[in-house]
Amino acid sequence: MNARTAAQLVQDAKSGIENLTPDQVAAELAAGDALLVDVRDAPERSANGAIPGAIHASRGMLEFYADPSSPYHKAPLDPARRVILHCASGGRSALAAQTLKAMGYANVAHLDGGFKAWQAAGKPVEA
């Protein structure tokens, strides 16, 4: 077996998904068609704030929240909907986007660089 590092897994994921800039994400959110999903853990959101309008689905529960047959399913997560994921710097959200694609989400992307890139671009953040 050829073991892979976390960095290699993230790079593999990024090569097979749509990687968006903060400006691209902001434009999609402004158009009103996309669901933004924050996969960071709750303490990260509390400490650093959140992107306005993002729903929270921590990475550890994402598959359960995203599966319509799961008792934990979150209604906004719809395989037919445009879904954009983000984390702190883009690693977890790349892996999460890859996972949602495997679960049948056809129109999924992630914010490359994550919340940190969003903040660096001067985009709005709520407490």
Image: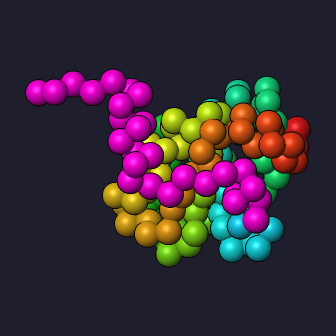
Residue 119 is situated, as x and y percent measured from the top left of the image, at 80, 38
Q: Is 13 a magenta residue?
A: yes
Question: In the rendered image of this protein, does residue 113 appear above or below residue 124?
Answer: above
Which residue is at 78% across, 47% downward?
51
Tell me the quarter of the image containing the N terminus: top left
Magenta stretch bounds: 1-27
Which residue is at 82% across, 52% downward?
52
Residue 27 is situated, as x and y percent measured from the top left of the image, at 76, 65
Residue 57 is situated, as x and y percent measured from the top left of the image, at 59, 47
Question: In the drawing, does residue 30 fall left or right of residue 98?
Answer: right
**Of the pair 28 and 126, the residue shown nearer to us:** 28
- The answer to whether residue 53 of the structure is visible from this angle is yes
- The answer to whether residue 40 of the structure is visible from this angle is no
Q: Is 110 a magenta residue?
A: no
Tell me the quarter of the image containing the C terminus: top right
Q: In this view, which residue lies farthest toward the left?
A: 1
Question: In the drawing, does residue 53 fall left or right of residue 73?
Answer: right
Question: In the rendered image of this protein, does residue 71 appear above or below residue 13?
Answer: below
Question: In the rendered image of this protein, does residue 35 appear above or below residue 44?
Answer: below
The answer to which quarter of the image holds residue 50 is top right
Which residue is at 36% across, 42% downward?
12
The answer to which quarter of the image holds residue 69 is bottom left
Question: In the rendered image of this protein, does residue 3 appear above or below residue 26?
Answer: above
Which residue is at 36% across, 31% downward?
8
